[in-house]
Image (cartoon, coloured by chain):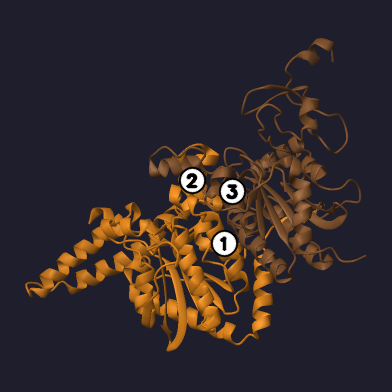
Amino acid sequence: MGWYEKLLPSRIRASGGGSRKIPEGLWHKCPACAAVLYRPELEESLDVCPRCGHHLRLSARRRLDLFLDGGGREEIGGNLESADFLKFRDSRRYRDRLADARKHTGESEALVVVKGALEGRALVAAAFEFGFIGGSMGSVVGERFKLGVERCIGDGVPLVCFSASGGARMQEALVSLLQMSKTGAALARLARRRLPFVSVLTDPTMGGVSASLAMLGDIVVAEPGALIGFAGPRVIEQTVRERLPEGFQRSEFLLEHGAIDMIVPRAEMRARIASMLSLLAPPPQA
Amino acid sequence: MHSEHLDFEQPIVELEQKLEELRRLVSRGEVDLNPEIEQLEQKCRKLTKQIYDDLTPWQTAQLARHPRRPYTLDYIGALLTDFEELHGDRHYLDDPAIVAGIGRFGGRPIAVAGHQKGRDTEEKVRRNFGMPRPEGYRKAARLFRLAERFRLPVLTLIDTPGAYPGVGAEERNQSEAIAANLQLMSQMETPVVSVVIGEGGSGGALAIGVGDRLLMLQYSIYSVISPEGCASILWKDANKAAEAAKALGITPQRLGELSLVDEIIPEPLGGAHRDFKAMTARLRDSLEAQFNQLANLPPQQMLDDRYRRLTEVGHFKHV
């Protein structure tokens, strides 16, 4: 690459090699305030715009990297992949969409679940990959989530999940809807064992994910400015035929209406969740 | 009357009208037309069977939404005695899009909750076309907890286009109302049987549809998204609803092939609305058998079976 190319406001350029393909460009435009930001500086600030405080979306891996202690991680359900059991085809084939999503995200599905540690305390953490078909929940997402919950129960550790999803995956039809009751049933068991579940809602958390696992946290946390809701704003606008109120379905709106416990800026996420977990369930003495 | 019938029902309706005329002539004693009537009746049955044997998924969806289709309160009236409706979520309002109550089924106490659509314009509006707000789901949750405490089996009847997408519904946390029911129903210590009687519209349907058995009437549908909604998102064209209906596999038959439905209850020739009595008789038999089966299970086994049932749903491969 020539030096002049490096100076251009570059588009997505995959970082060479390895399984992690975080899109990388030298300059990044803040989607909220349109400030042009220097990529390394943005990464330094955890992908929060230094100008306006907008929380940019994170890939699942980066999310977990920022949240968990370094090292000692074990992925749960990583060997599961979608099967196009309906041979679903709309304007494109589902299997082609899956192949594209794998290529673009470097992930095999829209949820990454790992056993790791937070400030020295063992837990299971899950994060949605929004770049993978809109973080939609199908069979693999549901199964990985369930395996994560069952691992929590087996090891007696808490669960933290970062949601970022458009909802159920239409290409898996009713099976995707039934992932809602699947994750709900698994979480009911977790609750019975008195193991805490902290659900973190990030931009966006909608539809079938919002109306199942995401809203079932013992504590429900949101990142600032995240879009959170059941029905999408456009669907609502078409139904009620009026302009939606300012800030509708944003984290601050949900907090005001009593739907979530708190809004936590990304920089404080680790410390505050660690603190709350230790209040709810002191880690077992070694 | 015209709008009361679907396009593909029209030939049947025309034959039926002819039959009606002939019968009127006979009743006046003017002529003996009995052989003709018999012939026509036979023709009508044959035609109906022909049409209904070959329904497309989209036609099934239209039947599931048929304006004359029996609704929850119709079934409650026919199947239960001593029914008392329970109103309100105790916090905000009573949502008429969901009916909840207690009564007797075959002489035994039971709790019932179901979506309710309206028959005429005024009632349609009052019941919000069967689209519940959060309070509807919270009313149902209240009924479920009551049922569990007093060991009443629970029957839910599903018939909704979906949970209502409105500003107020979002303000009062529609997502939480649905999610809470999924969790509650998955561990309720009482048998739960759900029947899709018409439209099973997405999360709004599932929110009262988690339990030990899922039954579907022959011409009902159950889907993650309406065929129209799916068409407008994936095909960018709402007119592709018929194609979407096919791709989504929303019919009981297709869902049965995927092992997502426990029992498909056959409807009378031409659909539930053409012979409501026969429909309720079949539904009663199925429900009695299902509730009897569940009553014979030790409670812990019932809960374990339910957990397996709910959590084993999914198709994936190990790589």
Q: Chain of mark 1?
A: B
Q: In the rendered structure, which amino acid carries the disc numbered 1?
A: Leu
Q: Residue at x 33, y 54 (%)?
A: B6
Chain identifier, colour orange: B
Q: Colour of chain A?
A: brown
Check the image and name the residue furthest to the right: A286
Q: Is residue A90 above or below residue B199?
A: above
Which element carries disc 3, helix, strand or loop?
A: helix
Crowd band around label 3 with a 10 angstrom C-alpha radius: few (<14), some (14–19), many (20+)? many
Question: Do pointers 2 and 1 mark residues of a single chain?
Answer: yes
Question: Do pointers 1 and 3 mark residues of a single chain?
Answer: no
The numbered mark at residue B255 is 1
Q: CA distance from mark 3 to mark 2?
A: 10 Å
| Residue behind mark 2 | B229
Which element carries disc 2, helix, strand or loop?
A: helix
Q: Are marks 2 and 1 in contact (CB under 8 Å)?
A: no
